[in-house]
Image (cartoon, grey):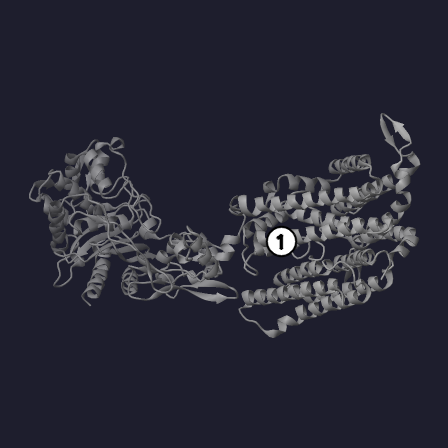
Amino acid sequence: MDRRIKHLALFFMAAFLLLIIDLTYLQIFAAEKITSHPKNTRDLQSELQVPRGKIISSDGKVLAKNKRVGLNYARVYPFGNLTSAVIGFNSVNYGRTGLEQTFNGNLLGKKKVATIEDYINQIKEERIGNDLFLTLDTRLQRAAAEALGDKNGAVVVLEPKTGEILSMVTYPRYDPNNLKENWKSLVSDPETPLINRSTQGLYPPGSSFKVVTSAAALETETVTPEKVYDGPKELRVYGGRVTNYADQGFGEMPFQKALAVSCNTIFAQVGLELGAQNLVKFARKFGLNRDIPFELPVERSKIPSPRQMDKLELAWSAVGQGRILVTPLEIALVGAAIANDGEIMRPRLVKEIRDYKGNVLDRFEDKVWVRPVSRETAQTLGFLMVKVVDEGSGRRAKIAGISVAGKTGTAEPADKKRTHAWFVGFAPADDPQVVVAVVVEHAGVGGAIAAPIAKKIMEAALELVEN
Amino acid sequence: MTSERNQEFLGLFLVITLLLFGFALVTLTLTRELPQEIFALPGALAALFFFGHLAMRLWVPKSDPFFLPIVSCLISLGLIMIYRLKPELVLVQVLWIGVGTFALITTLMFFRNYNELENYKYIFAIFGLLLLLSPIFVGKEVHGAKLWLKFGSFSFQPSEVAKILIVIFLAAYLKEKGELLSLSRWKRWKISLPEPKHWGPLLTMWLISLAILIFQKDLGSSLLFFGLFLGMLYIATGRVTYVLIGLGLFLAGAASCYYLFPHVATRVDVWIDPWVDVAGRGYQIVQSLFAISSGGLAGSGLGKGFPQTIPAVHTDFIFSALAEETGFFGAAGVIVLYLLLTYRGLRLSLSASDGFGKLLASGLTTVFGLQTLVIIGGVTKAIPLTGVTLPFMSYGGSSILSNFILLGLLLAVSQKTAAGGESG
């Protein structure tokens, strides 16, 4: 009998040993594969227990912080809907958007675990998130939001020499502090308050695109500022026609004047001289048909390929109509290229990441993104854009004592509803500190609607720079 | 003062330290405070361990000093996990451990001379069968299995107690008939077997196991009882043929059930691939696998994991929760504790001086070891999942009570063996 008891003992030993081997497989060898299954909610749940880092504006205001809810933390956004387009939200129920999404790992304080020391530290230390320090200024953000008011549209304000985004406003907005109460209406609202129009709204640029056409024409020496064109009421092209706003006729004038008064029939001729290849090439150099590197999701601005453009469409494209679609951020970057001697700096919202003790973990340097035109072209065009504000369609953006460069746009939307009003400009023109791009949906004429908004914002920005 | 009991005391001291430390750690992690009141219940538990220890000094002074510390350690780990998962159930569990300790002391007082049990084997058999099959007629279905008897708000799992009665019966029966059953006088198709009139017990156990499976829908208990029977039959007769035929019969029965009963088929399908229906039928086992795997080597730390996502985590799945929060170190450690207990039990069976003692000790150990294998194997998806409790760790009165009686009987055999055949 004893021999059989030993057999039974061997059976149990083997069985328990198999269990331990199975456990090794589950907990060590296959652990990563099993735990990374999408139905495993542990990561999400454990993230709730980490105090996320704060998000702090360039003027030192806290834009996102935490409050305790039992064992977990919940996010509080002191500036509510004013900064929601940029900050986004972090919610168990509705997910994550904006900088909360892009910098989730940093905000959670995730660290690289490369050495045994890292591993030990990770076990010992309680996880505390890292803080984001932004380029955004809440004072300017407020000024821009007030200037835009309650009209659907967007504003982008940036510093051309560094690429720092100083303000980014969209309307309508949402309050990230009470998503639960409003979620249904936010999602179903046809005005799409959850969309950040400054990076994800695609609009026909209208005449604001003439900056790109002009830059291409100057850079390729297709035109000079003094080259004279005839600007009739309408121009017949390839079986169709190009007309001016309000069917105005301009007569003969130099190119620089044509930009100032935004004469479509002259820009159509410039476009035809330039050719589709060149127009699209330069549009791409300025950022259309490519992805803008940015901390928030950006829709790609579009221009059709030269092969798909007939002469009529080329003529319309040169004046910013046709099938061209741009984001307000893209138009701001076009302005930035002219303001910054032909170089577009990589746009960015985050200056620094610091740990909770204040040690800088990451500092983002200024970087040139693209160089679409030469310094000479940029300076010449900048000079022409001053004329737009001084004596042309952008007069309502004029600031006393400061020279402002700009370009208006009145874009016909595809649905043929009321036009979108555009303005892109920078100031002071001789030493640009700030670029502003404004779009107001279905609001009318750029010079009348968008230019005064941009003026208020530039004034506010310059006042902040001076102090 | 025996050296066995002093060793045992030292072991208990270590276990009590672990228990208090565990409660402090869980409280601190979950509430960031450490009020003294939280030590009341673990303190009461420590006192119960100490009562058990005193009872053993009194009645079974020479018994194996490993049993009580290992069992106390498992109980403590179980209670720490219950405190972490369902703090409101700690009081009830401690009360049941109190009842269990009382049952242990009673067993030591009255059944030290366990050989007397032999005389009542048929009474045990009848009671065991009645208990085992009672849920079929008056039972309540919980989680798709009929294993519970309900008396008002009080529910009871009779199979837990029945297993001990059946072990006692089988030990007594096989001691008497083992000899007969090992003889082969009947030959057909080159297989020699004992005469058909002795096949009764094998067929009876097979039918009972099938009845449990079919009527109570309880794959775990069914497997447990049949496995227990085969193990004891093997030890008593030494016939591998029995084991093979028995396994064949069980597999045939189980296979027919797979095709006949959808609940059995579901269990097996989910075992083969739980990932096809993670949100539905595979939910429980997948949540268990997530918990175990996320534990990794060192675990998330007590109170820092998320095992509450597993349904029935404090009863059948307590091992998964432990594996998540204490990692491979903790989970493998617990398996080693069960292995040690099984090993001590079988060693005891080896050294027991009489046939009944040998069979009783090996039977009790087998039922304990098998139950552990079935549930840990189930929650780790090594075998199909079945609803049995993890001895000494799971929340639940019937399980605690019966396992304390089991421990008492083992200690009684141990005392007699150590005392050289004289019962203490």
Locate residue A142: give its quadrant.
bottom left
Residue located farthest toward the bottom when viewing the structure as drawn: B36
Subunit under mark 1: B
Q: Position of residue B58 (x, y in %)?
A: 80, 67
Taking the spot 82% from the left edge, 39% from the top edge, the residue there is: B238
Quadrant of the rendering where the C terminus of chain A is positioned? bottom left
User: Is residue A172 something that shows in the picture?
Assistant: no
Q: Position of residue A342 (x, y in %)?
A: 17, 47
10 Å crowding of disc 1: few (<14), some (14-19), many (20+): some
Q: Mark 1 points at which residue?
A: B333
- Left or right: B349 as drawn, with respect to A191: right
Residue located farthest toward the top when viewing the structure as drawn: B189
Residue in front for this viewpoint, B398 or B310: B398
Residue in front for this viewpoint, A460 or B24: B24
- Left or right: A296 as drawn, with respect to B134: left
Q: What residue type is labelled 1?
A: Gly
Taking the spot 57% from the left edge, 60% from the top edge, the residue there is: B302
Locate residue A399: give its quadrant.
bottom left
Residue in front for this viewpoint, B114 or A288: B114
Decide: is A81 above or below A370.
Answer: below
Q: Position of residue A382 (x, y in %)?
A: 13, 50
